[in-house]
Amino acid sequence: MLKYIIPLVLFITIAVFLALGLKLKPGEIPSPFIGKSAPTFSAFKLDAPDQKLTPGDMKGKVWLFNVWASWCVSCRAEHPVLNELARQQKAMIIGLNYKDKPDDALNWLQTLGNPYMVSIMDQDGRIGIDWGVYGVPETFVIDKKGVIRYKHTGPVTTEDVQQTLLPLIATLQAEPQ
Amino acid sequence: MKLLFLFFLMTLSVTGFAVDYRQLATPEQQEAYESLVSELRCLVCQNQTIKDSNADLADDLRRQVFEMLQQGKSKDEILRFMTDRYGDFVLYKPPFKTKTGFLWLGPAVFLTVGLIVIFVIYRRKKASAVTILSDARQEKIRSLLEKGDPL
């Protein structure tokens, strides 16, 4: 009897672990920021390098914080999706131009369109570290109180927008300030 | 001989090591720096420490560790700074929590189960080895032994 039970138990154990392993996404590291206040910054605007932007400027509004760079290939794939999202005007998108050359970045926006209300510059990647950025593109959703409610790692697709971002934005917009 | 020399050259090429240009004021700080960069995970390559990785982010994180040590921050403060931003995943040695309990206790549990299985199998083998011989055969053995060696 034991002769049949032992291989069966072994098989089930291995199968369960392998099945769990299939569902894991090691590329997506859970952000410790969900439900916490957005890290603060004070950074120069890409299109107006003499003006600064801080998260306080967006207080009372639902906003998306999208990390992008002109050297980032996945950002190029994501860009039309962001343009479309910006056109719908459900929430404003702030860009974090991560470790980029301002000229390249401006050129990129001119050629591909600009979904961002403002992009700020993070040439040495310090704001990126403060926000726990490890792969570009990344997108954060921040509520009216300035709390990070969601993080998306990797390029945002049309399905992500329809199934996750838009419903979340609608809920957050309905929340009191 | 030539072949041996060739193999020798081959081993040389593998032992190249990374050079970090950062130098801290005191040996204690330098030691803290060395230990921190080999304890923190590069989040881009995931299976490398920020010491081993050439990724851009790894270099930025090394810079961050270096600057915080220069500012006189302790090792714990720097580790907290990193886990606040990147979560426990950034640590090569995860802390003992309910979520990581299986990770820490798993090997001990498996070892115990393995030892129990071995013990049970051993006991069973021993018990069955005794009963396998029937009374008639045991009697025969005894008589053979008593008679002694016929030669």
Image (cartoon, coloured by chain):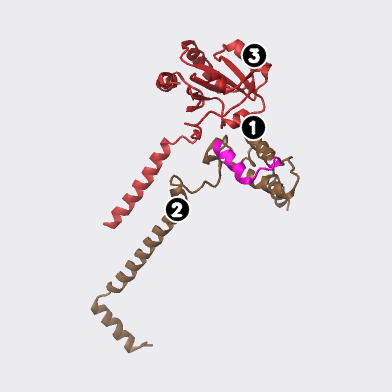
Residue B38 seen anywhere in this rendered image of the structure = no
Q: Residues within 10 Å of mark 3 (few under 14, many from 20)?
A: some
For disc 3, the marked residue is A47
Q: Amino acid at mark 2?
A: Leu
For disc 2, the marked residue is B105
- Residue farthest to the front? A177
How far is disc 2 from disc 3 in space, using C-alphas? 54 Å
Q: Provide the letter of the chain coloured red.
A: A
Q: Quadrant of the N terminus of chain A?
A: bottom left
For disc 1, the marked residue is B56
Q: Amino acid at mark 3?
A: Asp
How far is disc 3 from disc 1 in space, using C-alphas? 25 Å
Q: Residues within 10 Å of mark 1 (few under 14, many from 20)?
A: some
Q: Is residue B81 magenta?
A: yes
Q: Identify the secondary structure beneath mark 2.
A: helix
Colour of chain B in the rendered structure image: brown
- At a point 48% along the width and 49% down the height, the residue shown is B96
Circles 1 and 2, Cβ within 8 Å, touching? The answer is: no
How far is disc 1 from disc 2 in space, using C-alphas? 35 Å
- At a point 60% along the width and 18% down the height, the residue shown is A119
Q: Amino acid at mark 1?
A: Asp
Main SS type for the magenta part? helix
